[in-house]
Image (spheres, grey):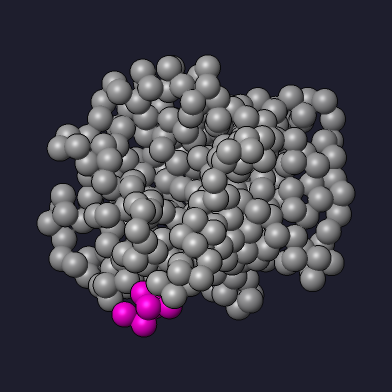
């Protein structure tokens, strides 16, 4: 109740829309700092796994994912959020979108050498390749949301949808107790810590990897709290970068655009990652290595923009944020992202170059 009282007080002073943007900014800064310092990256983890390794990148990804699950499920048990009210749960999910979009996104993130969230973090450190790829990603995401690619996305998404007008809650579907999600998160965390110890990952990096997962839980709790006190409907959401990238782009192009959580999230990640890189002395301008790399990155960004929108989220939005509330299509999308990424690494990257971070 104390948290709700604080949120209600802030909403009265700042306004609901500016407060939602502020919550997005806080979530984004937390995410950006933690992701930059931990080098969290789904693409790096999938490449490592595809090459028969269980190294530091895999350990960091598992720790981030499990931390998000643990924090979110604890918040659920404490009454700080209700996953059934999250927009991802409250609307029908697309199985076909998760499969096709997940595969396409997985291919794209290997070609672009980073998922959409990782590109945003790298762009903040001076990586011009990520700046170009990120802008292309945002444009294609917007085209897939409401532009010329939206009819194709809608057609593919409607091929196979969840029943009952809602997404599938995996905890309910498998009849698990209320604490089942927390127990699973702790089990994955134990595996991640074992891998971390085997790979001698520093304590600081482990803390920051956990911070990425905490940022996901923070977004869920803050938007849920705002939805409980706001006069107008508020979406209960957290970190994701497909829709927010498109919305942020349009916010700066449309004078009638309004503030919301998404508008604070993307700049927040950029600011957080930039501050983290600057404090560590890692700010450095980097360009494309050659024209072949540029073509691959641009094509990868296009595939991620469409695939992420079709899948209902990116590697963060579906893979961690949606996974933390056990949305059925999010887990399926994450699985297909792994398959698409590993297949692309096997067929393309392993023939051309060694794994890179």
Look at 81% across and 50% down and name the residue there. Answer: 126
Q: Tell me the chief SS of the magenta region.
A: helix
Residue 287, by quadrant, is top right
> Can you give x and y, in whole percent of width and height, for residue 238 in the image?
45, 56
The one nearer the camera, 151 or 277, is 151
Q: Quadrant of the N terminus?
A: bottom left
Name above or below for residue 348 compared with residue 86.
above
Q: Is residue 105 left or right of residue 82?
A: right
Look at 22% across and 41% down and name the residue there. Answer: 166
> Can you give x and y, in whole percent of width and height, for residue 144 in the image?
50, 26
Look at 66% across and 35% down and name the residue there. Answer: 253
Is residue 24 inside the magenta stretch? Answer: no
Name above or below for residue 203 compared with residue 319.
below
Residue 330, by quadrant, is top left
> Can you give x and y, in whole percent of width and height, for residue 282 in the image?
82, 62
Is residue 4 inside the magenta stretch? Answer: yes
Residue 159, by quadrant, is top left
The one nearer the camera, 48 or 30, is 30
> Can you give x and y, in whole percent of width and height, for residue 235 in the image?
38, 51
Q: Is residue 178 left or right of residue 282?
A: left
Q: In this view, does 226 lie to the left or right of 301?
A: left
Look at 27% across and 62% down and name the residue there. Answer: 82
Segment tinted magenta in the rendering: 1-7
């Amino acid at each position: 109740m104390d948290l709700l009282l604080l949120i209600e007080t802030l909403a009265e002073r700042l306004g609901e829309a500016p407060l939602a943007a502020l919550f997005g900014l806080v979530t984004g800064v937390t995410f950006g700092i933690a992701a930059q310092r931990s080098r969290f990256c789904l693409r790096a983890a999938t490449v490592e796994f595809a090459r028969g390794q269980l190294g530091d990148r895999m350990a960091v990804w598992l720790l981030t994912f499990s931390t998000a699950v643990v924090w979110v499920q604890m918040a659920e048990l404490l009454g700080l959020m209700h996953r059934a009210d999250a927009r991802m749960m409250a609307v029908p999910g697309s199985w076909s979108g998760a499969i096709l979009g997940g595969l396409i996104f997985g291919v794209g993130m290997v070609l672009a050498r980073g998922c959409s969230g990782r590109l945003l973090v790298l762009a903040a450190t001076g990586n011009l390749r990520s700046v170009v790829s990120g802008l292309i990603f945002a444009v294609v995401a917007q085209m897939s949301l409401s532009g010329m690619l939206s009819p194709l996305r809608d057609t593919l998404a409607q091929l196979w949808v969840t029943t009952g007008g809602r997404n599938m809650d995996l905890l309910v579907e498998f009849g698990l107790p209320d604490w089942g999600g927390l127990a699973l998160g702790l089990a994955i965390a134990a595996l991640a810590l074992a891998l971390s110890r085997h790979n001698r990952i520093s304590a600081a990096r482990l803390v920051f990897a956990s911070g990425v997962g905490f940022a996901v839980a923070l977004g869920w709790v803050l938007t849920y709290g705002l939805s409980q006190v706001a006069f107008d409907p508020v979406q209960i959401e957290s970190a994701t970068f497909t829709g927010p990238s498109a919305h942020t782009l349009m916010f700066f192009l449309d004078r009638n655009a309004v503030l919301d959580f998404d508008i604070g999230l993307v700049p927040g990640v950029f600011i957080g990652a930039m501050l983290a890189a600057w404090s560590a002395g890692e700010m450095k301008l980097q360009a494309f290595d050659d024209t072949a790399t540029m073509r691959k990155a641009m094509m990868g960004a296009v595939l991620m923009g469409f695939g992420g929108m079709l899948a209902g989220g990116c590697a963060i939005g579906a893979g961690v944020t949606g996974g933390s509330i056990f949305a059925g299509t999010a887990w399926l999308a994450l699985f297909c992202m792994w398959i698409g990424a590993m297949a692309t690494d096997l067929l393309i990257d392993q023939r051309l170059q060694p794994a890179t971070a």
